[in-house]
Image (cartoon, rainbow, N blue to C red):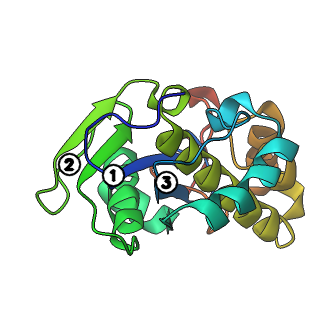
Amino acid sequence: MLKSYSHYKFEAGTDEAGRGCLAGPVTAAAVILPSEFDNEIINDSKQLTEIKRNLLRPIIESEALCFGVSHIFPSEIDEINILNASILGMHRALEQLTTNIEHIIVDGNKFKPYCEIPHQCIIKGDSKYLSIAAASILAKTYRDAYMEQIHEEFPMYNWKKNKGYPTKEHREAIKKYGATKYHRKSFRLLPEQLRLEL
């Protein structure tokens, strides 16, 4: 894992989780790590087990110079679309950073300039740069915790397990029980042949 992309001392890595879900927020995180930070386990959150992610979260939070996490909820996603919501989430996470950001590295290939700070989009950045990987772990663990919380309210969708992703079981539950306030109404909740009246 590379420590930084630029020569700047305060480089923020940012990433999001939950973009392809049918329910719940898209969650973004931003992290600035100290230059001496190192961790052998940190990787793209999708490559790690839930146990490892939950183990790494407090390490990242305690050792980062600063971090921010932001949820963008379904009503806002439906209003501005998922790409804009993902970028807005990253901007809101960056807003929470208490260290002056000198450069931003973003996972993926789409971003909008933030406060005129130079940035670089990096495809698969969460498996290449420590700060993006750390942001991906925070985004994923915070989002998963939120989905487990709302699972208690609507256990029939089993968000505790599927986290809002379009699994067969989740789609079957939507077909049977309809959509909740946590579902993204702008998403195709069911395949065409199973139209849902919203």
Task: Give the x, y percent position of residue 171.
Answer: 74, 39
Packing grade of label 3 (10 A; few <14, some 14-19, many >=20) is many
Instruction: Specify the quadrant of the image occupied by residue 108.
Output: top left
Horizontal side, residue 85 vs residue 157: left or right: left
Disc 3 designates what residue? 33
Q: Is residue 47 above or below residue 158?
A: above
**Looking at the image, which is closer to me, 76 or 192?**
76
What distance separates the C-alpha of mark 3 from that of mark 2?
Answer: 22 Å
Disc 2 designates what residue? 112
Disc 1 designates what residue? 87
What distance separates the C-alpha of mark 1 from that of mark 3?
Answer: 21 Å
Which quadrant: the N terminus? Answer: top right
Identify the residue shown where x is 79% and y is 56%.
177
What distance separates the C-alpha of mark 2 from that of mark 1?
Answer: 7 Å
Whichever of callouts 2 and 1 sits on the residue coming sooner in the sequence is: 1
Task: Give the x, y percent position of residue 36.
Answer: 52, 48
Q: Is residue 182 above or below residue 120?
A: below
Which of discs 1 and 3 lies nearer the camera? The answer is 3
Secondary structure beneath dot 1 equals helix
Whichever of callouts 1 and 3 sits on the residue coming sooner in the sequence is: 3
Packing grade of label 1 (10 A; few <14, some 14-19, many >=20) is many
**Looking at the image, which is closer to me, 2 or 172?**
2
Identify the residue shown where x is 52% and y is 54%.
26
Horizontal side, residue 5 vs residue 165: left or right: left
Q: Is residue 94 above or below residue 51?
A: below
Secondary structure beneath dot 3 equals loop
- The answer, for residue 109, to whether it is visible in the render is no
